[in-house]
Amino acid sequence: METGFDLALTLLLLGVGGWSILARNMMTAVIIFIAYGLLLSLAWVRIFAIDVSLTEAAIGSGATGMLMVIAAHKVGADARRVVHPSRAIHVLAGIVAALVAVGIAALAFVLPGEPQSLAGPVMERLGDSGLGNPVAGVLFVYRAFDTLLEKVVLLLALIGVWSLARDEDWGGIPGFRLFRHHNSVLTLLARSLPPIGFVFAIYMTWAGADVPGGAFQGGTVLAAMWILVMVAGVRKVPRVSSPLLRLAIVAGPVVFLAIGFFGFVMPGEFLAYPQGYAKPLIVVMEIALTLSIGVILGLLIAGPPKGEDAA
Amino acid sequence: MTDFFTIIAVSAGAVLFLAGTLGLLRFPDTLTRLHALTKVDNLGLGLVVLGLMPQLGWLSAAKLLAVWLLVQLSGAIVTQILGRSVSGGEESR
């Protein structure tokens, strides 16, 4: 029964993935890609990777999907920007993509020696960190440096989006041009859902120490609520030059780095935590990161700043 | 007895999902398709949740109920927005 479900899910994933590649219309392809992300998060649940599943649904399907919807809308609205590559380029791109897929598959099949699982040693020492969720333990204790760089990459992505602004628009308000008309039903949702969403985001971040969840998942929920508020026009989109906004953006990486450098003082190593204080410090980091991730994702989707006259 | 109730309710929910999907594929225009889809959101998901609730502790059951209520809210509002954008009038009613 369960094998049948897994088989059906795998076939569905392959089919939907292929469909999103073959779809003629750009917006259709994007919408199928979002459905593909949701199916993929179901597949992650099937192999008991709940943390990854939540991230896939929130970031891979939700946030990325929204970015792609906006991109497809912008490009599709302007016929001059729609590029029609020649058949040769299509074939070439297909060959390169197939080679990458075959290469990754080959790597998975020709792993040298017996795969060694580090899950045992991690679970053995997890108690020392005070955390209950092994994923959070690995992310913040064993691989803290990777986790730090991950957040800095988000910051760089936002700077990349902002640098698309014209010089005279710099410091202005990010342009939401998708939903400019007032809609009373959307306003109702934007007033009633965020209180629930904010509580849920805080819960997800807080619970992330012991059960699946954490800063990324909580931050995405936060971003979704903020985007809803901005799109419905309940609150204005802030200027990118606002000091408060910039503080929120860098709060996560700054707190992370500060605690990392404090590691030099106390246990004597970068990104190490003093004995017995690992969990409180990690929770402080997660809270700051949640805020930053939420604001950065919201701003990524809001897009580069635009002048008020430039529609 | 509990299992029997779950099987009946979840199966009925699944039938509604099937019917709603069929309607989504076969109905001629956006408004009728929305009509088919809302039945899935309300009753289909509601029956699945109702069927699963006796299998769980009260906390998990409450979480399922909360999921259903949130889907009610977002479903109703998305349907309204889509319906209004199809019928043309921004704030007609």
Image (spheres, rainbow, N blue to C red):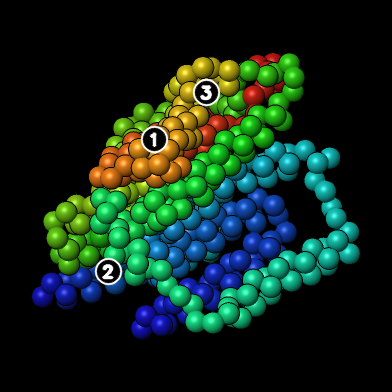
Q: Which residue is mark 3?
A: A246
Circle nearer the viewer, 3 or 2: 3
Q: Is residue B49 left or right of residue A65?
A: left
> What residue is shown at x 46% (from left), y 53% (from top)?
A143
Q: Which residue is mark 2?
A: B10
Q: Is residue A211 left or right of residue A119?
A: left
Chain letter belonging to callout 2:
B
Crowd tier of the residue under label 2, counting other residues whose Cα lies within 10 Å: few below 14, some 14–19, many 20 or above? many
Chain letter belonging to callout 1:
A
Location of residue A119 in the rendering, given as x and y in whole percent from the top left corner: 37, 68
> What residue is shown at x 86% (from left), y 61% (from top)?
A89
Crowd tier of the residue under label 1, counting other residues whose Cα lies within 10 Å: few below 14, some 14–19, many 20 or above? few
Where is residue A72, by image quadrant?
A: top right
Above or below A231: residue A202? below
Location of residue A220 in the rendering, given as x and y in whole percent from the top left corner: 44, 42
Location of residue A120 in the rendering, given as x and y in whole percent from the top left corner: 34, 70
Q: Are marks 3 and 2 on the same chain?
A: no
Residue A265 shows which numbered tag? 1
State how far apart marks 1 and 2 are (Cα): 58 Å
